[in-house]
Amino acid sequence: MIREARVIAHPNIALAKYWGKLPGDGNLPAVPSLSVTLQGVSTHTHVAFRDDLGGDQLILNGEEADAASLARATTLLDRVRAASGEKRFAAIESRNDFPTASGLASSASGFAALALAAVRAAGLDWDAARVSDLARRTSASAARSLFGGFVELDAGTPATTTLSARPVAPGDHLDLRVLICVTTEGKKAVGSTEGMKATASESPYYAQWLVLAKDFERLGALTEASALAMHASAIAANIVYWNGVTIEGLAAVKALRARGTLAYATIDAGPHVKVVVRANDAALVGTWMRAVPGVLRVIECAPGEGARLEESGAT
Ligand code: PMV
């Protein structure tokens, strides 16, 4: 018998970043974060527990994944096996329609999708918060992709045993778009876990209040400041995720603001600049950013839904 589930999940972009983990192996963020889940970029993941496997298998974008990625997936599956009656190995197939492992938050949608698919394939009826906690143990940003719209993840404390993200406001609460300016299709050299070990940062709690107050201008300013603080601390530890196009992109966003358009940049653990704008300005800002030398393409994303089941069953 095969027990399987298919899930779709979307990346999220942190407006207030988490960068830095608590000591220990709980994978607990040291600072709170606030993100928006994106529509228009997706991860599709299928998990099947089968009798005929001698170990877990992971196919990522059509190719067998490297040992480190498989080990992370197996750790998550082990937690699901320990909590369910399902003890067999699983075959995982996962596909992203955007660049993988390049700071476009593929680990967020990837582990959110894997957590939900594994839980449902194993027959567990856990709610989104419990699945969020499971995903968070592998990738803290993944905890946020279980939910749609604007989502918050608290910092952990040494006493924390479970920690889930939670929705703050629906996606249409703010008329916002994120323009992902892709600067390379390649993988990054330093993963975020490795990068964080060397750095620390802080991220103010008040981002959620700015969302609730629909204060786009202050939220945008905070978004850019949070990203620059994260990268300043990373760069000080010689962890540089930027390339030349990142700098050009940042300058282009500043120039837009000087012309009176409210546009704010954010950058994750990779070189792409993401521009947070009002929906009405998205077309103009997209044209402006496409003209930056080295920007390969611009993906426009509205706020999107949380991870969800497409199908599940046993055959
Ligand atoms: O999800 P992780 O643990 O790989 O960390 C990613 C952290 C950033 O994306 C750089 C910031 C954030 O809050 O999403």
Image (cartoon, helix red, strand yellow):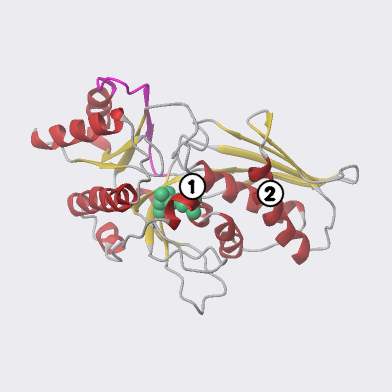
Dividing the picture into quarters, in which one does residue 284 lie?
top left
Specify the farthest residue to the bottom.
159
Residue 117 in sight? no
Dividing the picture into quarters, in which one does residue 258 lie?
top left
Residue 310: x and y in percent read 65, 42
Element class at badge 1: loop
The residue mark sitting in front, 1 or 2, is: 2
Q: Going from the N terminus, do you reach mark 1 or mark 2 first? A: 2
Range drawn in magenta: 290-303
Left or right: 75, with 96 as reference point: right
* Figure quadrant of the C terminus: top right
Residue 20 in sight? yes
Residue plotted at (82% across, 49% down): 89
Q: Is residue 71 magenta?
A: no
Residue behind mark 2 = 71
Crowding at dot 1, Cα within 10 Å, few <14 / some 14-19 / many 20+, comes out as many
Left or right: 128, with 259 as reference point: right
Q: How many marks?
A: 2
Depth check: give the residue in front, 261 or 70: 70
In the rendered view, would you say 173 is above or below 137?
above
In the rendered view, would you say 63 is above or below 191?
above
Element class at badge 2: helix
Mark 1 close to ligand 1, CB under 8 Å: no
Residue plotted at (30% across, 28% down): 245
Crowding at dot 2, Cα within 10 Å, few <14 / some 14-19 / many 20+, comes out as some
Residue plotted at (19% across, 30% down): 252
Under mark 1, the amino acid is: Glu
Q: Report the disc number at residue 53.
A: none
Q: Report the disc number at residue 305.
A: 1
Residue 37: x and y in percent read 43, 47
Real-space CA distance between mark 1 and mark 2, rounded to the nearest whole angstrom:
28 Å
Residue 121: x and y in percent read 75, 51
